[in-house]
Amino acid sequence: MNQEELKKIKEEALSEHIPIIMDETLKTIQEIIGDKKLEKILEIGTAVGYSAICYTQFLTENGKIDTIEIDHERVQKANENIKKAGVDKKITVLEGDALEILPTLKEPYDMIFIDASKGKYPRFLEHAIRLSKVGTIILADNILYKGYVMGDYNKHKQRTAVRNLREYIKLVTENPMLETKILEVGDGLAVTKVK
């Protein structure tokens, strides 16, 4: 992975206010993964490809990442960035609505990273569980959503997102097949291990 290109991609995304994974969140994920090398990673929400590029460091030599993005311009930008970073053999960007693409995926993943439409997190989770095996780690970013999820927030504009993020937390903490921690890093990270 070309570190210099990665730095440029990050700076450009930040200057254009494109939401990318926070350094603190990335560092936490690195700690969770540790020295393990993963065969397959799934990311729901590519944006400009920054996090997928970062995740290539967790892969085995022949490991692969599938990442899903609905926005056509972002897909083009992500493909461009992935090529510049020299990891285009490891990452496949799947263009379209995640809820239409996910049912077409069949193989289990070692890690699944959810960072797309907040209102759809519970539905993404259903697919994430189906695409998991024992030991798979499911990560949901921005789970505390600016602190609204744990407060008594009820403004109309974000109500659906907040309600669905709360539902996601309930689903991952109450399912006996899952072991979950909610970490207050970045904008909140739900870390779920499949038992």
Image (tube, helix red, strand yellow):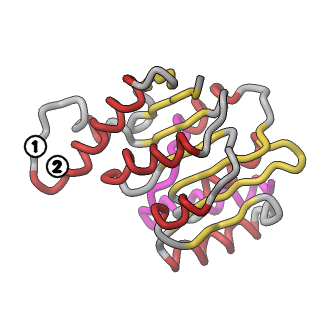
Does the stretch in magenta take in 172? no
Q: Position of residue 29 (x, y in %)?
A: 60, 33
Q: Secondary structure at mark 1?
A: loop
Asked if the residues shown at circle 2 and circle 1 are in contact, with their CB atoms under 8 angstroms apart, the answer is: yes
- Judging by the rendered image, the residue that carries numbered circle 2 is 159
Whether the magenta-drawn stretch holds residue 18 is answered as yes
Residue at screen point 53% across, 44% down:
128
The residue pinned by badge 1 equals 154
Q: Is residue 35 visible?
A: yes
Q: Element at badge 2? A: helix
Quadrant for the N terminus in the image:
bottom right
Q: Which residue is rendered at x = 62% and y = 39% of the image?
A: 132
Relative height, residue 153 to residue 51 (above, below):
above
Residue displayed at 51% across by 24% down: 177
For residue 48, side relative to residue 117 (left or right): right
Residue 148 location, quadrant: top left
Sequence-first tag of 2 and 1: 1
The magenta region covers 1-25
